[in-house]
Image: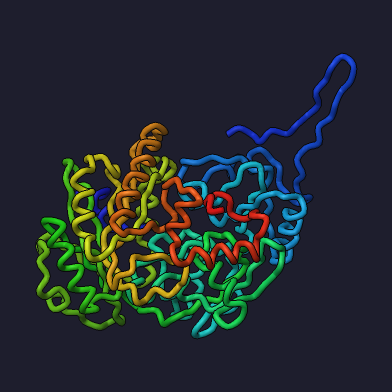
């Protein structure tokens, strides 16, 4: 098997303009009439290259040029900026490490709040850690593993910021056991759209706590989070199993989920290089160094092609960082910076196989690109407790994501994929599915109202209370 192919199969699953105009003088023979420039805060960086970098994100699909970029170093600086924005009616977009896909952390003619300077890991205790919102999950994991601790849920790609995933939920391979990352937050320090610095938790200011977690940044900018920690395993036994078709993959995924056989469970449908698909179950068992695992017992009763199975034993850190190797591969081939028109959804467990199968049957061989994938795996919804995380109301739902990695920087092709995403989203929504709100799908305020469903009144009321001028996170187009 070529080394690139091994890297592709082994990567973690799930995992993106012109200067704003400044009015000058209009000169006539009789007089010069001066126009006032748009206001910017005193500490804003107005350098063209800085503004240009903040005008796009990882998705490379949307470009919005800000007036300037502010890089706060404290809660107080965020609050001062927020009060300035309120006084001048200027919109703000908080930006973590720049990995949004569809312009969610961008703002046209407003101020980008670059959170990267707020990256301190402040206090690690046996059951919790206090961390600044601009910290990457990789840096946080390195700090906690030094004490044999870890967050219960990690995203597959650890280059995301803590604040960035708090805004949407934060899903990972252990989510069936521990829910979203937002389900493992103990407390938050938030600067609201009114410029107030507020601490919140399930017991203190719970309305704000529930509006900020998975609230798409609509009510405040998270400055700091207190996150739950658990004991980290020493090693991970990783199993990648391959199946002849979607029904056999789905049957085994349901079986091992019901039995609780694995500590992590994911799966994917992969391009096979000849216009068809390969079907993969990806799972892991945690264990201690020196302990012996009986692979045959772990895999007993499953219907995979055992001769194709890939089994590896890694330290927990090696396993958690596996997607980084895939990132390096994409960078080496120039594909990391191509447009990334991804679609991320949840299907009802009761019709997931049918809906996914119908969509797969209609996709062309180049639907996701040679290094892309369609992630497909079940979750138990009882572990999910964040009010604004939206899932189909069934005991089991399936993640269904089109992780498109186009082979070239073809803008027209990317736009076609985005249009296809919208058509697929409408189809999935009609079948009772729900979007995971990070994908490349154009959404109207009405679409968001439908998305949040019973949670919409809660978010709408919180927005009115904490950001009545609608200055925060305009890239989502929620209000």
- How is the protein colored in the picture? rainbow
User: Does residue 13 appear in this view?
Assistant: no
* Left or right, residue 256 beside residue 232: left
| Residue situated in front as seen by the camera: 360 or 406 | 360
Q: Position of residue 241 (x, y in %)?
A: 17, 63
| Residue situated in front as seen by the camera: 409 or 176 | 176
Q: Position of residue 150 (x, y in %)?
A: 44, 76
Residue at the extreme right of the image, as rendered: 30
User: Does residue 24 appear in this view?
Assistant: yes
Depicted 76 relative to depicted 65: above or below = below
Q: Residue at x 33, y 72 (%)?
A: 381
> Count of labels shown?
0
Q: Position of residue 462 (x, y in %)?
A: 59, 66
Q: Residue at x 27, y 42 (%)?
A: 367
Depicted 156 relative to depicted 443: above or below = below
* Left or right, residue 424 beside residue 94: left
Residue at the extreme top of the image, as rendered: 29
* Quarter location, residue 435: bottom left
Q: Residue at x 33, y 44 (%)?
A: 423
């Amino acid at each position: 098997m070529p080394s690139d192919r091994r890297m592709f199969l082994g990567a973690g699953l799930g995992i993106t303009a012109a200067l704003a105009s400044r009015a000058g003088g209009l000169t006539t023979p009789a007089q010069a009439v001066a126009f006032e420039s748009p206001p910017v805060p005193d500490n804003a960086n107005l350098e063209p290259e800085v503004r240009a970098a903040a005008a796009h994100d990882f998705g490379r699909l949307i470009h919005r040029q800000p007036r300037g970029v502010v890089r706060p170093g404290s809660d107080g600086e965020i609050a001062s900026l927020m009060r300035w924005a309120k006084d001048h009616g200027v919109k703000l977009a908080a930006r973590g490490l720049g990995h949004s896909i569809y312009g969610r952390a961008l703002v046209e003619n407003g101020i980008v709040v670059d959170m990267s300077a707020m990256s301190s890991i402040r206090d690690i205790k046996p059951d919790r850690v206090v961390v600044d919102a601009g910290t990457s999950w990789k840096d946080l994991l390195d700090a906690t593993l030094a004490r044999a601790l870890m967050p219960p849920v990690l995203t597959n790609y650890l280059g995301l910021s803590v604040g960035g995933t708090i805004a949407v939920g934060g899903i990972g391979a252990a989510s069936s056991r521990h829910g979203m990352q937002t389900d493992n937050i103990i407390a938050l320090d938030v600067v609201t759209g009114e410029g107030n610095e507020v601490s919140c938790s399930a017991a203190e200011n719970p309305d704000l706590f529930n509006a900020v977690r998975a609230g798409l940044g609509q009510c405040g900018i998270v400055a700091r989070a207190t996150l739950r920690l658990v004991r980290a395993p020493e090693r991970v036994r990783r199993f990648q199993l391959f199946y002849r078709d979607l029904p056999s993959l789905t049957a085994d995924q349901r079986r091992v989920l019901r039995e609780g056989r694995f500590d992590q469970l994911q799966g994917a449908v992969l391009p096979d290089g000849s216009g068809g698909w390969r079907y993969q179950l990806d799972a892991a068992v945690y264990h201690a160094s020196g302990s012996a695992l009986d692979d045959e017992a772990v895999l007993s009763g499953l219907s995979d092609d055992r001769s194709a199975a890939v089994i590896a034993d890694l330290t927990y850190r090696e396993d958690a960082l596996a997607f980084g190797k895939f990132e390096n591969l994409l960078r080496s081939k120039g594909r990391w910076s191509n447009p990334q028109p991804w679609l991320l959804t949840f299907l009802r467990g009761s019709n997931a196989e049918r809906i996914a199968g119908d969509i797969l049957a209609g996709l062309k061989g180049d639907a996701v690109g040679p290094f892309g994938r369609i992630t497909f795996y079940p979750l138990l919804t009882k572990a999910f407790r964040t009010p604004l995380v939206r899932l189909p109301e069934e005991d089991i739902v399936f993640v269904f994501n089109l992780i498109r990695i186009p082979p070239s920087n073809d803008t027209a092709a990317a736009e076609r994929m985005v249009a296809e995403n919208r058509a697929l989203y409408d189809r999935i929504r009609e079948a009772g599915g729900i979007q995971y709100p990070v994908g490349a799908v154009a959404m109207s305020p009405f679409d968001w109202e439908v998305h949040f469903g019973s949670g919409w009144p809660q978010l709408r009321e919180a927005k009115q209370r904490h950001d009545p001028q609608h200055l925060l996170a305009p890239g989502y187009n929620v209000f």
